[in-house]
Image (cartoon, grey):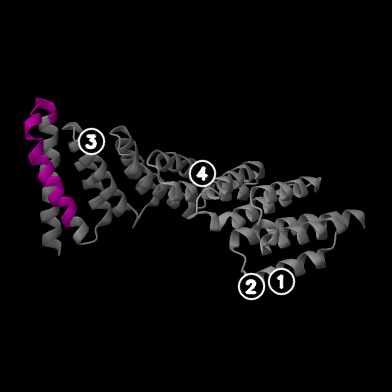
Amino acid sequence: MADYAAKFEDYQKRADDMMTEFEHFGYHSKFEDVVQLYSQAANSFKFFKSWDQAGSCYIKLAECHFKMDGKLEAASAYVDAANCYKKTSPIHAISCLDEAVNLFSGIGKSGMAARYCKEVGDLYERLHNFEDAIIYFERAAVFFHDEAAAPSASQCKQKVAQFAALLKQYSKAIEIFEEVARNAIKSNSLRYGVRGYLLNAGICHLCINGDLSEVTEALERYQDLDATFSRTREHSLLTDLVAAYEEEDIEKFTEALMDYDSLSPLDSWKTILLLRVKEALKTRNCIKM
């Protein structure tokens, strides 16, 4: 193994030396030789799971392709580098994918840009960096829209709405969930999710302390948007929660959630937000006492 490692490092060193020489003397026609050496080194390091070294070689490979005006090849090399760095350093992976997104976007490959922009958002989500995740999911949604990929654009927008709500940007989340619902109602393949989007928007309304009349008005608008919504369990849950909040009845609030959860388990996002609403209700009770 040590002999192999020395051989791969020699590939990289020869490529580094040639790169310095060619850049200094302007031998751009020889970049093909450097590309071959970096490619050999990168693939060899990857085979033996030397992820950081492989990632470094792929970055240098990308730089070579870029100098040869091979932007598509450079973008692909940055993706290869990111796939290696995912094993050791998500931040380095994000940096490489960001380079790839910019290159794909610059040459009109919106589909590829969308795919890897979303991947950056996923990585930021795993790091619980929701602010930056929002930036990349918003950008991915635009790319997917350019590619007429409505379902993928919708998924990215929902991610933005969810993260915005977690950051207590409830108005932004409501606006996005309602937009997604309006778009979905027009599509036979997407309309099945409308009641879920409206439930999410309604929960965000509940998170905004103050006049519950806004929630009631929202439910009326949702009925206008989807005539079947008033017959769904999602509508029943929201009306029960609003009633419990108005009555300041924590037990009734909890029972409504338990009844819904028994048939349609609440996901972690809904649970977090509904716990916030419940805590606000408890606070109101304590103040009155």
Residue 235: image location, x then y, percent: 70, 59
Q: Residue at x 59, y 47 (%)?
A: 177
How far apart, in angstroms, are the residues tagged by discs 2 and 1?
7 Å
Q: Which residue is mark 3?
A: 71
Q: Looking at the image, which residue is at 34% across and 43% down?
A: 111
Query: Mark 2 — residue?
Result: 263
Q: Which mark is residue 134?
A: 4
Camera-nearest label, 4 or 1: 1
Q: Which residues are magenta?
A: 23-44
Q: Amino acid at mark 1?
A: Asp
Disc 4 residue type (three-letter): Ile
As shown in the figure, which amino acid type bears the numbered disc 2? Leu
How far apart marks 1 and 3 lie (CA) works out to 56 Å
* Magenta: main secondary structure: helix
Quarter of the C terminus within the rendering? bottom right
Look at the numbered disc 3 and give the secondary structure of its residue: helix
Q: Is residue 259 above or below residue 193?
A: below
Q: Are marks 4 and 1 in contact (CB under 8 Å)?
A: no
Identified by mark 3, the residue type is Lys
